[in-house]
Image (cartoon, rainbow, N blue to C red):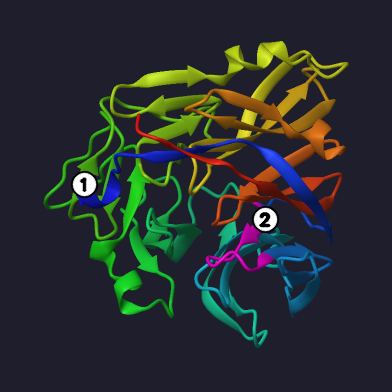
Amino acid sequence: LLAGLFHGSSLALDFKITEVVEVGPIYGGGLTEPAQWSPDGTKLAYFYDGQLIIADTLGKSSPVAKIDLPPHRFVWSSDSVIIVYQREQFTDSVDKKLSSLNRLISVNIETGEQALLEEFVNRVGDTYQKISHIFKGPYLTVEGNAYYYVQENYQAGRRPPEATIQMAPGLPPEKADLTRNYILRTAVPHSETLCATTDALYLVRADFKDSVRISNKFYGGYMGMPVSLSRDTTHIMFGGVIVRLADDKQIILDTLIKKFPMPEGTKVCGFGDESFNPIFTEVVFRLSCDDGHKYVFDRMGVFDYTTNQFVILDTLLKLSNCHSPVYAPDGKRIAFISEGVLYFLKRAVSDVENKD
């Protein structure tokens, strides 16, 4: 496993924008990662006006399915199927309590066909309710395969039973095999072969029967935000801190952004929407600044952690309040949102092999 996860070399690159493509208005809502590239990088999925919309590499888009509940999270499970978590709040007609309907569906973008995978109703704030079956997700394994958690006999107010992992339906056998998929965890769960611990970061096998320790010490993220892991599993990032796992060497981006003036009317800045380039030694992020009350100003940036090249993109793009950046699988395109409109940029790259 270790031989397959760790690599001896990587690629660094220069940043030069060659084209900015406007796709169209996008629904943000409570979505994490509002736009997502397909695994083959030829399609970009997003939501608007109650529709799931697919754009091609030229930015031409068309609706493929009507979505009847607000989307809150989604991932591609293949180049033609998307898994969507939907949630809608309502007042229960029986006990008059605020409740939420939680639903997980799959959508075939070629036919528009939808299939219900999971569903449960949760009474918000109720500490006595019992739910026979709940889910959480969808997510992607380290290998890029779609999955979600399921829990049986959930009871609010009590320690929940250990969740199990359900791989997305329709995956090929080699991608659906739990023994071939790993997830990043800050704690190893209880099982017959593993003891619960929070001493480090682990890649835990999806059947919870094996794990690989990938850090020298514990890293727990920042203010509830998840730890982002590089594709080669050699670096992590959280809250504007990049860590090389081999020796715990840290790069603190807060110290690098001081050369960039704060937007007028703001007092403090922080990092979010962080992700690693799938090909190159680079991260993209949202740099959000605010006045401590209501005014928020977002910018989007890129940092190469082998060359220490730091670029704020908004000025180069001649756009404002850029956020929610996400890399295409080729590492050369970035989708992002500016003022409620979805765009993606294309770039020319000069590859430089880095042996460090």
- Magenta span dominant secondary structure: loop
Q: Amino acid at mark 1?
A: Leu
**Residue appearing at x 75%, y 32% in the figure:** 299
Residue 183 rendering spot, x and y as whole percentages: 35, 51
First in residue order: circle 2 vs circle 1: 1
Q: Is residue 111 above or below residue 77?
A: below
The residue to which callout 1 is attached is: 2
Q: Is residue 234 visible?
A: yes
Residue at screen point 63% across, 59% down: 36
The answer to whether residue 280 is left or right of residue 339 is: left
Mark 2 Cα within 10 Å, few/some/many (few <14, many 20+)?
some
* For residue 122, side relative to residue 150 (left or right): right
SS for callout 1: helix
Q: Against 63, is 276 above or below? A: above
Q: Which residue is mark 2?
A: 97
| Residue 102 visible in rendering | no
Q: Which residue is painted at 33% across and 21% down in the image?
A: 248
Residue 241 drawn above or below residue 147 = above
Query: Image quadrant of residue 195?
Result: top left
Q: Is residue 22 above or below residue 177?
A: above
| Cα distance between the residues tagged 2 and 1 | 50 Å
Report helix, strand or loop for mark 2. loop
Residue 250 appears at what percent x and percent y?
Answer: 42, 19
The x, y position of residue 151, in whole percent, is 38, 61
